[in-house]
Amino acid sequence: MQSLLRTIYDDVKPLVGQGKVADYIPALASVDPNQFGIAIFSNKGELYQIGDAEVPFSIQSISKVFSLTLAIKHYGEGMWQRVGREPSGLPFNSLVQLEYENGVPRNPFINAGALVISDMNQSRFASPHYAMSEFVRRISGNPELKTDLKVADSEYEFRHRNAAMAHLMKSNGNFENDVEEVLKSYFANCALRMSCVDLAKAFNFLANKGFCSISNEQVLSEQEARQVNALMATSGMYDEAGSFAFQVGLPGKSGVGGGVVAIVPNRFSVCVWSPALNKVGNSTAGVAALESMTKHIGWSVY
Ligand SMILES: NC(=O)CC[C@H](N)C(=O)O
């Protein structure tokens, strides 16, 4: 496994820095684009890593998987009346579809969907960001995880597009709480800082039939874990989900901080990080690394 990581690293190194660091969130624009790390956490508890795998970064949309997991734990099947399970085929922050479809977002991984999930968690928890970050500290085994308040504040300052989605959903009766409060929780979740090692561990439960071997808890049922993997496979990479399935063939979730998590069911969870992004907002080197990985292991879910 360690030599596999070395091969991937060498394959992809020339792509590191290619693309553009997310700058629509000003506090993210100053991140050095030439960083690159990979971590793999196997279901047997083995950890492999290479490069900048212990450097914490802004998890951004990867947080949507954690919030979704909390919502599933507390709402079960009923929640799917408020958010769909279909790929959107549109950018993660698109507004148009939301109006056509009466304020019911296509899936929990586009921003509108994640905002509905945040609204559900806002109704359920006194402090949804505290609940989410405590949950992630537990399943990653890292009690030191921190939220980058500068990133969260910066996103809040430039919140208008996300705020527009939330207000549109509110006008359709699909939003219960105060928009500003939900936006603050959502941005705080996105601003959690984690390394590849933290994320590879935190996603163990999705590779392991819902059971987290770090915290020794059944996070989701086996069926729910399978469903979250299915949503990641169809919608985890925004409007690149199709070519990601074609080229990598694994459930994956990206964030504009440059992290990408992927699941090899029943075997391991992997996180790749490199901050420079391609046109749709996925890490250029991250996607290439996962492509190289599946080519070498000769395994995908398809
Ligand atoms: N794709 C992402 O990582 C987007 C998350 C970011 N916080 C936003 O709301 O725009």
Image: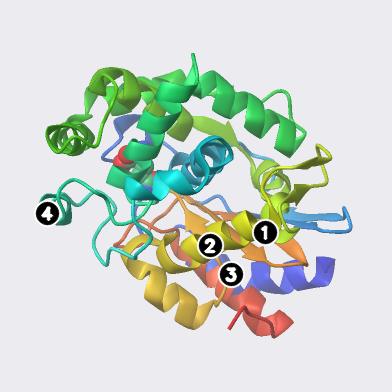
Residue type of the residue flagged with mark 1:
Val
Q: CA distance from mark 3 to mark 1?
A: 9 Å
Asked if disc 3 and disc 4 are in contact, CB closer than 8 Å, the reply is no
Q: Secondary structure at mark 3?
A: helix
The single residue placed furthest to the front in the displayed view is 78
In the picture of the structure, the residue carrying the numbered disc 1 is 270
Q: Residues within 10 Å of mark 2 (few under 14, many from 20)?
A: many
Q: Quadrant of ligand 1?
A: top left
**Rendered view: 96 above or below 111:** below
Badge 4 or badge 1: first in the primary sequence = 4
In the picture of the structure, the residue carrying the numbered disc 2 is 252
Residue type of the residue flagged with mark 3:
Leu
| Residue under the image location 50 percent in, 56 percent down | 253
Closer to us: mark 2 or mark 3?
2
| Residue under the image location 71 percent in, 51 percent down | 205
Closer to us: mark 4 or mark 1?
4
Closer to us: mark 3 or mark 4?
4
Q: Is residue 251 left or right of residue 254?
A: right
Res 6 label: none
**Rendered view: 174 above or below 158:** below
The residue lying toward the viewer, choosing from 61 and 77, is 77
Please tell me in which quadrant of the rendered image residue 135 appears: top right
In the picture of the structure, the residue carrying the numbered disc 3 is 290
Q: Residues within 10 Å of mark 4 (few under 14, many from 20)?
A: few
In the picture of the structure, the residue carrying the numbered disc 4 is 96
Asked if disc 3 and disc 1 are in contact, CB closer than 8 Å, the reply is yes
